[in-house]
Amino acid sequence: MPVEPIFDVAHLGHVELLSNRFDESLDFFTRIYGLKQSGSEGDSVYLRAWDDYEFHTLKLTRSDTTGIGHVAYRVSSEAALMRRVAAIEASRFESLGWVEGDLGHGRAYRFEDPFGHVFEIYWDTRHYDPAPEDRPALKNLASRFHGQGASPRRLDHINLLAEDVTEFRAFMETCLGSRVTEMIELDNGRLGGCWFTVNNKTYDLACTEEHGGGQGRFHHVTYATDQREDILRAADIFLENGVHIETGPHKHAIQGTFFLYVWEPAGNRVELANAGARLILAPDWKPVVWTEADRRKGQAWGLKTIETFHTHGTPPVGKP
Amino acid sequence: MPVEPIFDVAHLGHVELLSNRFDESLDFFTRIYGLKQSGSEGDSVYLRAWDDYEFHTLKLTRSDTTGIGHVAYRVSSEAALMRRVAAIEASRFESLGWVEGDLGHGRAYRFEDPFGHVFEIYWDTRHYDPAPEDRPALKNLASRFHGQGASPRRLDHINLLAEDVTEFRAFMETCLGSRVTEMIELDNGRLGGCWFTVNNKTYDLACTEEHGGGQGRFHHVTYATDQREDILRAADIFLENGVHIETGPHKHAIQGTFFLYVWEPAGNRVELANAGARLILAPDWKPVVWTEADRRKGQAWGLKTIETFHTHGTPPVGKP
Amino acid sequence: MPVEPIFDVAHLGHVELLSNRFDESLDFFTRIYGLKQSGSEGDSVYLRAWDDYEFHTLKLTRSDTTGIGHVAYRVSSEAALMRRVAAIEASRFESLGWVEGDLGHGRAYRFEDPFGHVFEIYWDTRHYDPAPEDRPALKNLASRFHGQGASPRRLDHINLLAEDVTEFRAFMETCLGSRVTEMIELDNGRLGGCWFTVNNKTYDLACTEEHGGGQGRFHHVTYATDQREDILRAADIFLENGVHIETGPHKHAIQGTFFLYVWEPAGNRVELANAGARLILAPDWKPVVWTEADRRKGQAWGLKTIETFHTHGTPPVGKP
Amino acid sequence: MPVEPIFDVAHLGHVELLSNRFDESLDFFTRIYGLKQSGSEGDSVYLRAWDDYEFHTLKLTRSDTTGIGHVAYRVSSEAALMRRVAAIEASRFESLGWVEGDLGHGRAYRFEDPFGHVFEIYWDTRHYDPAPEDRPALKNLASRFHGQGASPRRLDHINLLAEDVTEFRAFMETCLGSRVTEMIELDNGRLGGCWFTVNNKTYDLACTEEHGGGQGRFHHVTYATDQREDILRAADIFLENGVHIETGPHKHAIQGTFFLYVWEPAGNRVELANAGARLILAPDWKPVVWTEADRRKGQAWGLKTIETFHTHGTPPVGKP
């Protein structure tokens, strides 16, 4: 009898990013990229896009390095949380146990992929409650559209690097019940990249092959804009603010999203993306498989992938 | 113990529309609105948007009247289908039993709401398999982007009329496990409208109060465009083709979608909409409640709702 | 022998607006509408859009009333200035003589239309010289794109009210050498409105019939955005800031511009518009004539013209 | 005494392109690029964009080679035509004398630049008169917006190659009275490129340095779209139709236009561009000068200029 799809995990919740140029990074994420600060505690500032419903989707933490602190997914219910914990504990992947949570959510269960990225899942969250001056004119928005900088609408996805994407895929399917929507099969038979989702978004996490010998490295985090035009406008904002534009705007062949990649001051790669009306609605969606021959055509409209896209991750290899 | 969310139903599958000016309606839906014809049989033509993954999302049927034939949802698995059938049969709502399906899908289970709209759920479907000349350049699309007419990307939602929206809400929650994302509470305590979803779309079906004494009437069907600009461009296409533009382009206060409403030649209302990056990701989303006072502000940017929007449905009242 | 076209006047230069709620108006024009302040002197602040090449295009003056102070056009050369002065002095229209100029330009020649609007023409101007922090990343822009509020690109046009549009037309043709690109002919034979240009813009000044018995009244001033999407985004900014949105976004039938009208805090009407790639390139362009029957179809996509658009001008009738 | 600006030439009128794959080129320009055919005679088909006011802006001619036949500008009046003819005949540049015109216009005066490109100027033209089925819904458009393919609005500019851009500049200033709006000064002191206009468009003709030893070669012709989104949409149309996309969509640093370059089947380069609301309104505009150091930054958002952009012209060097 066919296995039924798993709906235990609701969505990507937040990501913790490390910065060794904290003040500049915070200025970038708030004034230029256009997230809002909802709180701070210790070495961390809690940030969210104007229509993210939770207290935060980005936890920016002062550090002596860069890259990712942890990745968090919110589950569908308390019962779903316990089912996932049981599945993880029964798996070959490493459990790290419960943590108490922080300003943004309650207790969370942590575990780790074989490449050193820390994940957590949680049910008990803090819905963002806007102060009077942050209340939107329309009550179905999470907070006021402030129009500051690029001002994307919500967290979209993250991209991690792993030396063995096939093994990373097993981790995602086992621990989160993620589905693969698209992937790259290299000529040598290995997986070059894999795009995962737990819901109708075309992906909430991508994993691409680590070529630099790094461990637990981070490729990028992405927020979604309502329109492609928002990204073209953002490109001018980045230009005027001296932000390093790595590549784009252009359209990905894989997943078809319109994209723009920049590096925040500490070197973490940050994307803006727009998927248009594309969703994965089919419950029996078959992963789309891209070959190296396909990839040689470049991005959707022919742009060649820039070299740093294959080599730059955070933290830089050889750094702590 | 809290009830867990239901994930049995995957997405709105298709709608059957009736036309008493069939040839003109077909010309509208293909040449001007920009759907593609995937087949025909008997009195019906099967249509789909270029990125709809199934064989059809609109079944246009020659008739002596207008309005809706039936609404179909696809379920998440065969087991989910049987769970839904059991739930419907255990409910107070009317079962119509199994039908054999048509060109677009296999057997389906039919049932009816208290206002005369026929619903069906099915698992066994026909994935659209493009002929060579309809194959897209990018393999993650369902078919070639043809750029004909308005050419929306995919089916988005439908809107039905019911004399008692509260009762319709019970029907949707019981039979499909739908969630309410937004609703209108009238000053008299009645529900004026209710927006439902079974997945991360902000809604796939809306029900608004029937004021004209009709039975089983249809308000509109909507396809999604990738960008708002597609809708502005479509407005010019409708204008040049003499299509009746009822209202828009503008932005809804409720659900925040950018919209444009026209009437196809037989009088059925058809919408184009763009939701930007808005999704309902929260598993514990609380319905947004709009009051009559809220509604008096008009649409998002102040446009007053046009009178025919409250009165025009299909078929016209008093017609067969 | 046919008369040759006149190229003496180069473009609309600036407009002086009066406000009896000056501080609120200034906050609107800078923080929300997104103009930049280049200077202030006495009761006036000098404002410009980020790509306006002159020191100012809007002079906002503290007053006990609203409406327009004066309208200014820049000429093509010093010799052209003297030709225009000669033409005006030889005409039946009223000369007001030379003024010394202000922070934004040198000496200017003033004259008045029969309805009390003061015009001036000037050659000697002050090119905007951005301070280091206002220098654009691309040297072909007049200043940095700051992305503040609606942030339109440049001044586009103004609209005045006159009791006799035919007489106003004679004034524009005689004094400025303006061409009429489009006009409304009423059933009673009168001109209901007239759209003028001195260059390739489709219009830089419109005159519509005064119905309220006012003298020298102002209808609106408009800045141009690069894209229609900028206007849709601005609508959300206006909404979140409690600005009165009068009508739009929609597309004009006349001139085909995409528009949005709001009232600044003192009541002066302000527009954002986008003409797309439309220009008047034909040197022998024949005015497009719209009838009342045409106008009854509403705007391009059918929106009915809102009543206040016919009645609201500044200052309000009966006020000083 | 300062020389006054020259307004004799009104606008770029049309360009004649040669194709040695005529049927494929014609299919490209009509079905995919979206121009309309207004007539044909002999080896030529006459094409125009839907809002071009003249009978044609592109004359496509069957040939055994590619590249340009001639470039035509329309003047401001009959008297202006005679002034230009006198200026050309008094110059050191080569006069070719009067030709009788063709389907699209009356007599024209021909002359040649030092690099073998044939120019003509004319006053007597044929305004496009749409057949009933081609009449637009709005009377201020030249013809119906048909929405076929990319469907740009109007002719924008052309780009020619010349071995000595400084000499070409003298030709344009002397013969047409063109103004230089932007230019590239190479480290060796030569002009690398020059952008010219006769009106408020930022440019109607660009000349860049010929590096391949060709004579009278053509770089590209460009039509303008109303919005940047039209260009993003066109990229998908080109992709689905197997058209070679050379580079873009992206934004030029020089002139700031949003662009997309493709090669039509015979190899002639064709662009779509959108300038937003940017115009050259200043009568005393000083040319913007770009250095090689500036150019090394790439296009506006950092895209490196693709190698073929510097080498590919039509006809190919060494071909007839």
Image (tube, coloured by chain):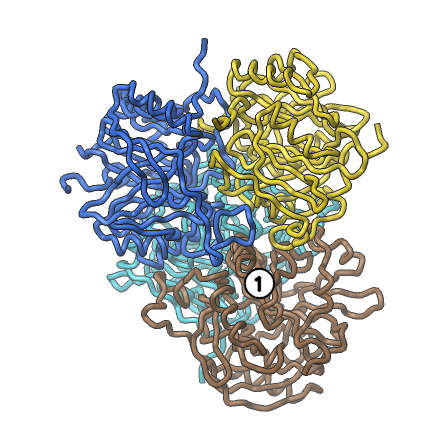
Chain colours: A cyan, B brown, C yellow, D blue
Left or right: A208, with D140 as reference point: left
**Is residue D144 shown above or below A79?**
above
Q: Quadrant of residue B3?
A: bottom right
Q: Is residue A212 left or right of residue D5?
A: left
In the structure shown, which secondary structural element does the residue marked by tag 1 occupy? loop
Q: Quadrant of residue C69?
A: top right
> In this figure, which residue is indicated by the disc labeled 1?
B243
Q: Pick whichever, C209 or D275, lies toward us.
A: C209
Q: Chain of mark 1?
A: B
Q: Position of residue C182 (x, y in %)?
A: 59, 40
Q: In the rendering, at what x and y percent does residue A217 appear?
A: 41, 50
Of residues A43 and C56, the one nearer the viewer is: C56
Q: In which quadrant of the rendered image does the N terminus of chain D lie? A: top left
Q: Residue at x 68, y 68 (%)?
A: B180
Classify the position of the C terminus of chain D by image quarter. Answer: top left
Residue C246 image-quadrant placement: top right
| Residue at the front extreme, as displayed | C1
Tell me: residue B35, above or below residue D129: below
Q: From where the camera sits, is residue A46 visible?
A: no
Neighbor class of circle 1 (other Cα within 10 Å; few <14, some 14-19, many 20+) is some
Residue type at numbered disc 1: Val
x then y, percent, for residue A76: 59, 67
Does C241 sit above or below residue C87? below
Residue A179 place in picture, x, y as percent: 45, 68
Q: Is residue B266 visible?
A: yes
Callout count: 1
